[in-house]
Image: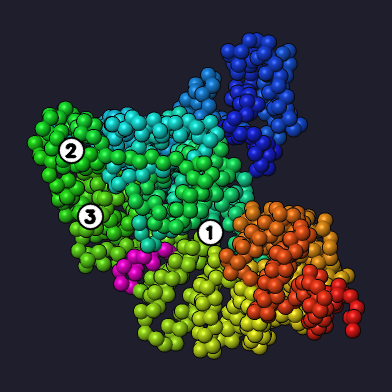
Amino acid sequence: MLQLNLLGEQRLTSRGTDLAGGGSRAVELLAYLVVHPGIRVPRSVLAGTFWPETPQPQAMTNLRRELHNLRRLLDGVDALGMSDGAIGALECAGLRVDVQVFAAERAAALAAAGKDPDRFVAHAQAALREYRGDLMPGNYSDWVPGMREKLLRECTALCDEAAAALTSLGRRQQALEVAGRRVTIAPLEELGYRGLIRAHLALGDRPAALHAYHRCADVLERELGVAPAAETRHLLGLPAPHPGAPGPAARPAAAGNLTVGRDSEQAVLETCWEKARAGRPALLVLSGPPGVGKTHLAKALGQRARTGGAAVAFARCVDASGRIPLAPVAGWLRSRDIAPLLAALPEPIRHEAARLLPELPDPTPWAGSDVPPGPGRAMVDAWQRFRFFESLAGAVAAPGRPTLLVLDDLQWCDPDTAAWIAFLLDSPAARQLLLVATLREGADTRPPAIGALLEGARSAGLLHRLRVAPLDEAAGAELAGRIRGRPLGTDEARLLAAATSGFPLYILEAARAAPGDGFGTLLGRRLSRLGPAARSVAELAAAFGRGISLELLAEAGDLDTVRLAAALDELWREGILLPTGSGYDFGHHLLRTAVRENTTPAGCWLLHRRLAKSLELLNAGRLDAVAATLAEHYELGSNPERALSFHLRAGADAVRVFANSAALKSYDQALGILGRLPAGTERDEAELSVRRAMSPPQTALLGYSSAELLGNLERVGALAERLGRPEVHSASLVGLFAGRYVQGRIEDSYAIARRALDLAGDDPALLGQAHFAVAGAAQGSGRIAEAIEHFAHCTEDSPPGYSYILGTRLHIHARAWAAHAHWLAGDDAAAVQLCAQALAGAQADGHIYTRAVALAYAAVLGQFRGDRAAVAEKAAELIALCHRYDIAYYGQWGEILSGWLAGGKQGAARIRAGIGALRASDALARMPYWLWLLAVTLADGGRRTDACAVLDAARATAALHRDRWWLPEVLRMRALLAAGDQSAALLDEAREVARAQGSNALLARLGPDAG
């Protein structure tokens, strides 16, 4: 089944796979035919319509080419009818067209109108589900605008009729939803807002009705420079503006006000936008001090871009400890230009996007393969972060047209959003994308994640920076004059510049003052005019620290709906709170700060308690989604027990969206609370729970050998021992084994693994992991027979599940590593068989990290066996997999082996780079083997002295860390480069080590004993 989507996008798909998008003339040709149903269009007319400025013969050639491309895209679907030199679209079962479905459902609704209200509503709602946006947005071919307007009028009329029918049926909540949809479809039509206001009032929700009015007023003022009509005001009983008050142009949102004096800045923005439209994506950072007008410049570009048919989405970062990871990305996906398209995305993309958007139906929810997703799976699922990021990028690109993303206050961006932005900019989804971010001057190097994002974009040639400076005296006077409705005199302009330093925010504050007022205290004056109710609402919104919903304002405040509505209207008229989404937010962060600074500490404490309790009540069925915010407010409201609980939930929810840095922040905050509690068993139990949850995201984010992870695991072990929890102690020791082994501390890891096995009890899964640990450490230290024995226990006696400590399918990982032990023991056939089983199991399982592990061990086995073709194949796939899914440790194996294959100076350099990367992450396991590969490459290139130095380093490393499994081969090669008695002594030592280890394969390489 082919799907042609033309409403809100322009895309032809087959089973969720894009066949062609907005730039395809073949798809545009098909679109023209399907929106003119029942008509056969002469070829000459089609050619003239699509290529009006091209000579007729060439236009006909172009038409034949695009028809050929269209037939290829349709792939046998009989969607075109041709006769007598004319072409038309045929309705067929193999092609679903949203425009056709909309038309059919609308026709069915109109046929039932006045006869069968229920039938009318059912068909009307089905039609509205198809209308996800304007017809082919961004396409301005001559035939499109008229048809676009016709469909828009049909849809808005259907909304009005459906809302009325639902109201008459008593289905007022559904009527409200349709009225809201109508406003989204046609946001500049005041009539739609009236319907929404009526729908809210019918439900007795005056604050929500007033919010709709405020949205209406702001949109009309911003886009058209007019105020709502009297009829709209009368619905709410609002008075006409005072005759002496400033008109619509006085509001900050008014069209053109805040771009005064910004011609050069606007030119830079327009240039970057035009380049992005042409396929050159970029990150444009507007930097400057707060209040200088960065956000308004970005929003002004957004208005112009949307007028030109682009998809535009706005999000803001917040300065709060309880910020939710990836919240700006969720904000973009919920924007009016993107959200309606998500339901039509391919299932895999919707599945991943549903992690971030709980309201988006998940087409393939977790089915229970092992255990549900949770914090314990952080390492197991770490590789899926790429898939998640890729899907979010695909969702942002859903409009299939030039896209502008605006991110306000980049300096407060969470690390995971910053990482995703870096991914997005390097993604095919960014082909026609411009991301404009505002950044407070001097803050760009503070958070490491922001610095990494900017440096990465700069290195890729994607970063553009524009400093926004205060306005000069003339521009400031012009802006104030526009607000006041009269030009300023010379003395007034000079006084204004002195009082505001050219900052537009303060100029607006000064100009909003009543005529005759001087330019004195600015923000404080506006706040001082508030009545008690408005001040209490402002304090509540400021304490929340981000946009606040009407529901939360009503629940956490102490005002009835009438007084709340009046307070909100006062705050809006003063320009302090502005409507956003389903609630309000401060017009500028400085306003929020000013309100906070004027709230007493006791008042803040009470507000946070109210907010926490109300937020928990309102989100009773989905607490995980707001757990970080709840933890913040419970902690600020002096309720550490509830804060602790929600920090734990926030950490688990962050892991679910691969935001491991956010998870660790939540767990660290939980430990901070615990550190303030009295010592005792209860506190130890709680700490143990937190630290166990921390280990998997620590491993995924920081690596097996990180000091933070190993310190945490040691603390887990100590707590488990104190509390008499041997199974927890054993699991922590398996994790500690992995860290110490990767660090190259092989003998330590062996002792730890043995202790883990002693404590494992009779739990098959835990026993399997302990046997794995003993086997790995035994092989590393040269105990080959012992390694084979314990690998066998692991693969044969334990269930074939995941190791949530190691992050792999344990039975596959064990077979891959056991292949090395069997080869060292001289059983090449068993080694090859185990390696093949591991590769086949990893391929069938589909777990990418396990696949990378199997490939890494297979590539090394190929090197053991001298099978260069196998090494080349496995290393290439390993490197590609690790690069795509950001798997560092095993990727370096592939790099080193590829350097050995290449040989020469370039090969040696590649090996050195791989070894350097391992050392930088304190991953020294197998270092004698990696150094041996470097020495082989150097020696083959004639650099014998350098090779000897590297081999001596390998010997020293093996002795220091007891990493002895490859030592016989290191000694053999060093003997080959030595002379006389030294060579013979080295060979004797190599034979002695190989015999002691039971390493028959390496013993065979040494040849017969001369003695």
| Residue positioned 51% across, 89% down in the render | 722
Q: Quadrant of residue 15?
A: top right
**Colour scheme employed for the rendering of this structure:** rainbow
Residue sitting at the far top: 56
Residue 351 tag number: none
Q: Quadrant of the N terminus?
A: top right
Q: Position of residue 73 (x, y in %)?
A: 71, 32
Label 2 neighbour load within 10 Å: few <14, some 14-19, many 20+:
many
Specify start and end residues of the magenta stretch as a single range: 627-639
For label 2, the residue is 497
Residue 657 tag number: 1
Q: Are marks 2 and 3 in contact (CB under 8 Å)?
A: no
For label 3, the residue is 595
Residue type, mark 1 in image: Val
Q: Is residue 629 left or right of residue 352?
A: left
| Residue positioned 58% across, 44% down in the render | 427
SS for callout 3? helix
Nearer mark to the viewer, of 2 and 3: 2
Res 365 seen here: yes
Residue sitting at the far front: 980
Label 3 neighbour load within 10 Å: few <14, some 14-19, many 20+:
many
Q: Position of residue 736 (x, y in %)?
A: 59, 78
Q: Is residue 152 above or below residue 211?
A: above
Q: Is residue 561 above or below residue 233?
A: below
Q: Is residue 360 left or right of residue 496?
A: right
| Residue positioned 34% across, 68% down in the render | 634
**Gap in Å between the C-alphas at discs 2 and 1?**
48 Å
